[in-house]
Image (cartoon, helix red, strand yellow):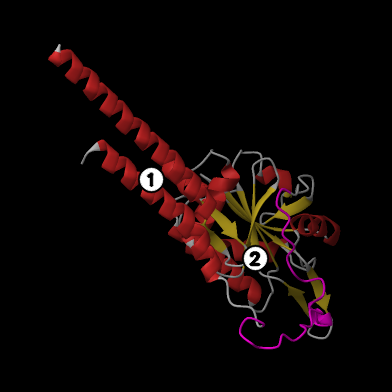
Amino acid sequence: MKLPRLLALITAMTLVITVAAPAARAGAQPASPMARGIEAKPVDNTLPKELEGIGIEDKPGAEVPRDARLRDQEGREVTLGHYLDAGKPLVLVLAYYQCPMLCSMVLNGVLNAMKATAWTAGNEYRVLVVSFDPRDTVELAKQKRDSYVGAYGRDVGERGFDFAVGDEANVRRIADAVGFGYRWDEATTQFAHAAGAFVVTPEGRLSRTLYGVTFPETTLRLALVEAGQGTIGTTLDRVILFCFHYDPKEGSYVVATWRLMRAGGALTVLLLGALLFRHWRNERLGTREAS
């Protein structure tokens, strides 16, 4: 294929990417009620009283209280900072050990994601579960830890996968820092709370909030790569992270169209440069041979 035709083809492809991506995003938007000829009705956004104060507020970059005091499953006094001092990202889960259902669903979701990834808690990252029920004991924490570490089936080492308890004041500081809401419900004699997990950087800042009770392996892995800031993961992981961003509504990492367009543009420039250089070199060689 001659150079002019190659240049024309590359230019056309670039234009298609540039035009099609925004159009695809626009086309994916649902039609408004007015556009469909349906009269829009006002939406009541009032939060039911039962749900007040139990959501999760996304606080990216928030600093966690490293000095918050806890006791681990062995009864040893620790601080939150102890789990950050190895320079590894931390997966933080707030739960309570006598929760009838939701906490177990969250913990099972985290465990399944941990088992699915090739990285091991204690090596590339750490996991800490903190109970927000001041009635929970060290004995309960140990039972939970033994159960989940046994199900994990890998050597987690020291502080790799711990379960802790604490008093109301210290645990509340941690929960408030990451935006986790919970409160005691006297009517049900249970805690009302949200579902999710939090990924914290080695410097002690909230990097990513993972919502829900299931966490795909890719979501956990990319969240750890993001929080690790280059300390874990392969070059390919970081390239993938560049092309994706976390969407709280989807609860997962989705394609960042503008980043792909930028990467595609850079690749196009490099390809054009290589083709022009090759064309220029061939012309010079042809001129020398002719002379």
Compared across the picture, whether 85 is left or right of 217 comes to right
Q: Secondary structure of the magenta portion, mostly?
A: loop
Where is 69 relative to 129, above or below?
above
Mark 2 — residue? 196
Please tell me which of labels 1 and 2 falls first in the chain.
Answer: 1
Residue that appears at 35% across and 45% down: 10
Q: Tell me if residue 209 can be seen.
A: yes
Compared across the picture, whether 72 is left or right of 283 comes to right
Q: Where is residue 86 in the image (x, y as percent from the top left)?
A: 61, 39
Callout 1 secondary element = helix
What is the quadrant of residue 266 in the picture? Answer: top left
Q: Does the magenta stretch include residue 100?
A: no
Q: Where is residue 12 in the image (x, y as percent from the top left)?
A: 37, 50
* Neighbourhood count class around disc 1 (C-alpha, 10 Å): few under 14, some 14–19, many 20 upward: few
Residue that appears at 52% across and 48% down: 259
Mark 1 — residue? 11
Q: Which amino acid does label 1 sit on?
A: Thr
**Residue range corresponding to the magenta coloring:** 34-61
